[in-house]
Image: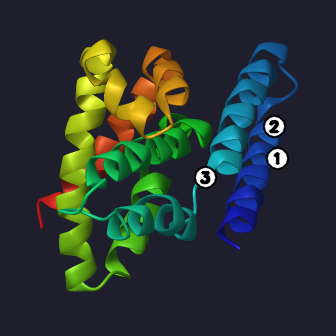
Amino acid sequence: MRKMAAMIMILVMVALTMAGCGGRDAVSEDVAVETAGAEDAVANAISASEYMDNVFQKLINMETGTAGSSLKAAETAEEILSFATNREIGKVEEAANKAAFNEAWESLSDEEKETAKNNFRDIAGLIDEAFGDYEATRGNFEDAGVGAEMEELVKSEEAQKAWKVLGDLWAEVDAE
């Protein structure tokens, strides 16, 4: 529903802008470029339910303090970074990203929030270390069965951008 409303607003703005341009080609080209960028941002918008399913639930369900928990942390780290990268959260409009992320966060219980915070800190350290020196963490990811996937992610500029955006979103809720 929000995507449709945003798309309608963009189309109305484009129509009004084009009507006011008086047919000047240079202005029309600028509007087309801006419109394409806005449509991409709307098309890439991430819903609160996507954040819930692909970030928060993975963190909440991540087992800690058990045999194999470090493998589960490596697997969860790769899954969350893959989600952020594949959904191109670095390209999503900041306000829309924050709204969806915060909506998902606010739907969690206090206990779920605490679990998610603790587990995010664990995987954040692992992901940061992988970006800094993948060879030092390679064994963790390979043992978890996601070594090749993680190696590709740490080489990707899109993944680095996505991780920065996700970290910024997280920093706001972690401060609560």
Q: Give x and y (percent) for residue 169.
A: 31, 51
> Which kind of residue does numbered mark 1 sit on?
Ala
> Which kind of residue does numbered mark 3 sit on?
Ala
Disc marking residue 57 = none
Which of disc 1 and disc 3 is earlier in sequence? 1
Q: Give x and y (percent) for residue 110.
A: 20, 83
Which of the pair 102/139 is nearer the observer? 139
Which mark is in front, 2 or 3? 3
Disc marking residue 45 = 3
- As drawn, the residue found furthest toward the front would be 67
Q: Residues within 10 Å of mark 3 (few under 14, many from 20)?
A: many
Which of the pair 159/64 is nearer the observer? 64
Tell me the residue at 25%/29% (across/down). Answer: 128
Q: Judge left or right: residue 51 versus residue 62.
A: right
Res 69 quadrant in image: bottom left
Q: Is residue 42 visible?
A: yes
Q: Which residue is mark 2?
A: 18
In the rendered image, the quadrant that contains the C terminus is bottom left
